Image (spheres, rainbow, N blue to C red):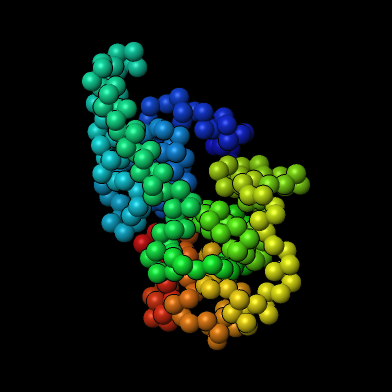
Amino acid sequence: MSTYIYNTEEEYYDEYKKSYFAITKLKGGWDCMRHYEILANGCIPYFIDIEKCPQNTLSLLPKELIIEGNNLYDKLKCKNVNELNEEEITEYNGLTGKLLEHTKNYLTTEKMAEYILKKTSFESVSKILYLSWDINPDYLRCATLHGFKTLFGRDCHDYPQVPHIYKSEHIDYKSLYGKGISYTNLLEPMLHNEKLDDTILEDIKNKYYDIIIYGSYHRGMPYYDLITGIYNPNEIILLCGEDLHCCNYNNYLKNGHFVFVREL
């Protein structure tokens, strides 16, 4: 935590906004919130060893454009900003525009939610149950939940409620992982329907929801036995957002579930 030198999102984002490049790399896993924060703030990621990333990991990241960014950095790194010529500035701005466009079209939380629904052929669903066991911060679970809540509002019900993604005066967001930057304090509280908390078992038994999503099957799968007795296997979607894991996703695939794994 001592390496987190920024106290607010504004400070942190501003550093990217005024920078031409920002370093990012493999840490615990290839995927990282930092990649998206750099891209969304109009900065070019200098991604060390991106060429070594497995094909099916970071599959939606614009790897070829990022490699172009690496090459551009290598070409410009010995120059001061005021030494850049018009051609170099044009090249930089052109690449930044392409990266921003890709980010808007493929990498927002809403686009990630749409991607999951498209890949599972559930683009026409109207009600989603998004289940967690451990409600502590998990970037993938929190980001995808935000995407589904943005698309479906109260018709995507998170149970139990993941409190830190909602706006509140009673949560110390800075005490959370990464000081809560980028994934907390985002949704209006009214987007969680507390009445559905009270009828969760009845609603599962009555198949009130069209599909079930487990935000992190590694961190717990509440009501799984009940749900598999009522829902078809392909109506259950499992997410794995872990950096390092011995992932048993093949077992769930054999059971007929859809599984999305962050680090293959």
Q: Which is nearer the eye, 257 or 179?
A: 257
- Specify the farthest residue to the bottom: 229
- Residue occupying the point 47% across, 58% down: 113
Q: Residue at x 60, y 83 (%)?
A: 226
Q: Residue at x 67, y 44 (%)?
A: 173
Q: Quadrant of the N terminus?
A: top right
User: Whole-percent x and y of residue 144?
Assistant: 51, 57
- The answer to whether one can see residue 251 in this image is no
- Confirm whether residue 57 shows in the render: yes
- Provide residue 231's location: percent of width, then percent of height: 52, 81
Q: Nearer the viewer, residue 232 or 55?
A: 232
Is the residue 118 above or below the residue 253 in the image? Answer: above
Residue 5 falls in image quadrant: top right
Above or below, comparing residue 204 to residue 179 in the picture: below
Compared with 255, 170 (above or below) is: above
Please identify the quadrant where the C terminus is shown.
Answer: bottom left
- In percent of width and height, residue 105 lies at 38, 47
Left or right of 69 in this view: 110: right
**Which residue is at a point 44% across and 55% down the rendered structure image?**
112
Q: Residue furthest right?
A: 170
**Compared with residue 33, is residue 221 higher up or lower down, i.e. above or below?**
below
